[in-house]
Image (cartoon, coloured by chain):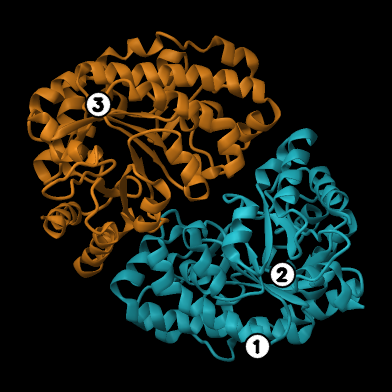
Chain colours: A orange, B cyan
């Protein structure tokens, strides 16, 4: 029965009765239920307490007609067992960022992901609740995005320190990326072992790179993770924003579903991606628009897919904090209606 | 003699003895001479005092072996004669942003650019100094980028108010864009009349749009400006960042030179742009790297151009504030050396 979930069928490019839909950051600040929980719990407490992570994961499933749940967690949880100090204030901040050879040497790699047992327990709890209705997606940050946070210590405008290490100390960069990729693969394999029915690798900041930087310094490591994940047997979604300049290379690196942002026409994306399934790609800002414009934008994406198999509807990036819940709900309804066969 | 300047010949895809090079934001905070002037003058005072604007424009020409001067000004100067209040603190801020139909109605359009006589006087002063050595580029912000500042009131992460007007009030958006495009065209025509030998239209934030948003709400207005500028007879550079998703449409909208950011391989850009000249496209962050990596990145771009006519070397976006001047200088030297015929 689980195998026949609409979302999982679309990931495998099998026929579906309607296009499945879910939303990146579908659990979060835009929902009153989430803000209520945040009054008494920090982001890290929500993510690391299995019962709370399960509750937050389920919130959007109660409010929206969506086809998949995504584990509530943060892509930076992995940096703690690697040896870094992570806080949210409210954006993520690492107080001991990685800058030197000694910093990199000190990082734990193989085995470190096992310390995130709270996450795997959350996966088990959520699976019990979603069984037979929605698919559960596990996730991790892709090596570049996680490494850039580890180096910069937080969000960055220009990735100056990251790109300097990449360009001037490719040897150090390589050692760091090998550690991050090992932890990433083990972390996602353990999520699958705990019950995740698909996994998504988020390369949220990859669009800061030139195609040459991506191919030389990042792709081999992303490919290594994606190759390992293929062996788990669950669908793997490889998502990146700003991948337009190297989409063929990005899609060729692995994953059965390629996630794209809103900066590309979906039909162009499909052509460039080839036979794989595609996920996307509504501009999250359009959820602030009135019904007419939003509906037209949803229809444009459905039309550009043109009834082809292997489309999962999503945004081009995460839901923004003050997004009206009604818009999100309507969007999911429209996707199902417009694509119903 | 001026017609034979290397930069102007490359804009026209004529043969050159070496690839011309200049840098977006080549006059600015990364230079000690500029920081010295800023101790006693505001950004607006520098831009609006012809002698000071001339001096700042000339500073990089003394320090760097570059082939073009670009007028020192700001893309938001045009909003003042249109009726808005502009300050820099230090980022640009508009205290009476455009939000309603009445706000748009109140904006001055035809004739407003004539009030920027200080800019045209600066162009005349600079031309006298650069005559026969470097070409002088005038510039303006493209309608989308200027309109988004007018609406948001300053830099924006998501362009929520701008995109909402575009989507929900396309009638208002259209009236606003028609006013902005009129001012933009008249402003650039006057710069050419004063002596600018080429002009660049900066669409710095265009990459925030989906291809559909660009085609429907922006391209007709950019095209209108570019069509008018073609009649001036000087080369027109149409620059945008993040244009990868609609580069053919962007290049087709007009301009004899298309400027691209670093998120695309230069050879791919050339193929997609077609017969026009191309400008770009080094990642500005690479100027913080060591010599070896920087030189390899410059060579990669020269190699990807492969000796074809119609290449102007530049960054993919502006020089960042703390960039080492030596790196900029070396880059210009390498471009000339590596491309010399």
Q: Are marks 3 and 2 on the same chain?
A: no
Report the residue that reaches farthest toward the bottom: B111
Looking at the image, residue B23 lies above or below residue A172: below
| Numbered circle sitting on residue B114 | 1
Q: Residue B154, can we see it?
A: no
Q: Residue at x 74, y 70 (%)?
A: B11
Disc 3 designates what residue? A46
Label 2 resides on the chain identified as B
Lower sequence index among marks 2 and 1: 2
Label 1 resides on the chain identified as B
Label 1, secondary structure: give it: helix
Query: Looking at the picture, how far across and down is residue A231, in whole percent?
Result: 33, 20
Query: Looking at the picture, how far across and down is residue A172, in whole percent?
Result: 63, 20
Q: Residues within 10 Å of mark 1 (few under 14, many from 20)?
A: some
Label 3, secondary structure: give it: helix
Label 3 resides on the chain identified as A
Disc 2 designates what residue? B47
Q: Residue at x 41, y 84 (%)?
A: B175
Query: Looking at the picture, how far across and down is residue A9, in whole percent?
Result: 18, 38
Q: Residue at x 58, y 51 (%)?
A: B264
Image quadrant of residue A48? top left
Label 2, secondary structure: give it: helix
Image quarter where the C terminus of chain A lies is: bottom left
Q: Residues within 10 Å of mark 2 (few under 14, many from 20)?
A: many
* B97 and B57: which is toward the camera: B57
Query: Looking at the picture, how far across and down is residue B290, in whole percent?
Result: 76, 34
Image quadrant of residue A56? top left
Image quarter where the N terminus of chain A lies is: top left
* A68 and B252: which is toward the camera: B252
């Amino acid at each position: 029965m689980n195998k026949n979930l609409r979302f999982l069928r679309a990931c495998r490019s099998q026929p579906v009765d309607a296009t499945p839909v879910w939303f990146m950051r579908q659990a979060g600040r835009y929902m009153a239920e989430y803000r209520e929980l945040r009054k008494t719990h920090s982001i890290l407490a929500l993510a690391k307490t299995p019962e709370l992570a399960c509750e937050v994961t389920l919130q959007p499933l109660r409010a929206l007609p969506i086809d998949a749940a995504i584990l509530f967690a943060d892509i930076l949880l992995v940096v703690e067992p690697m040896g870094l100090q992570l806080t949210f204030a409210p954006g993520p901040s690492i107080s001991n960022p990685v800058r030197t050879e000694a910093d990199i040497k000190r990082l734990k790699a193989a085995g470190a992901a096992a310390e995130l047992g709270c996450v795997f327990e959350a996966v088990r709890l959520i699976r019990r609740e979603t069984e037979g209705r929605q698919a559960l997606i596990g996730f991790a940050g892709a090596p570049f995005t996680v490494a850039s946070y580890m180096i910069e210590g937080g969000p960055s405008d220009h990735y100056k320190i990251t790109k300097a290490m990449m360009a001037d100390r490719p040897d150090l960069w390589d050692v760091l990326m090998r550690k991050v990729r090992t932890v990433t693969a083990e972390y996602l394999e353990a999520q699958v072992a705990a019950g995740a029915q698909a996994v998504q690798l988020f390369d949220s900041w990859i669009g800061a790179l030139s195609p040459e930087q991506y191919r030389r310094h990042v792709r081999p490591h992303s490919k290594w993770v994606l190759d390992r994940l293929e062996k788990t047997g669950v669908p793997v979604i490889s998502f990146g924003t700003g991948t337009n300049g190297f989409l063929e290379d990005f899609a060729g690196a692995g994953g059965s579903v390629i996630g794209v942002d809103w900066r590309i026409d979906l039909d162009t994306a499909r052509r460039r991606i080839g036979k794989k399934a595609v996920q996307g790609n509504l501009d999250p800002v359009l959820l602030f628009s009135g019904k007419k414009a939003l509906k037209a934008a949803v229809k444009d994406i459905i039309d550009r897919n043109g009834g082809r198999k292997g489309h999962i509807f999503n945004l081009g990036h995460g839901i923004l904090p003050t997004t009206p819940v009604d818009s999100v709900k309507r969007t999911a309804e429209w996707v199902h209606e417009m694509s119903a066969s």
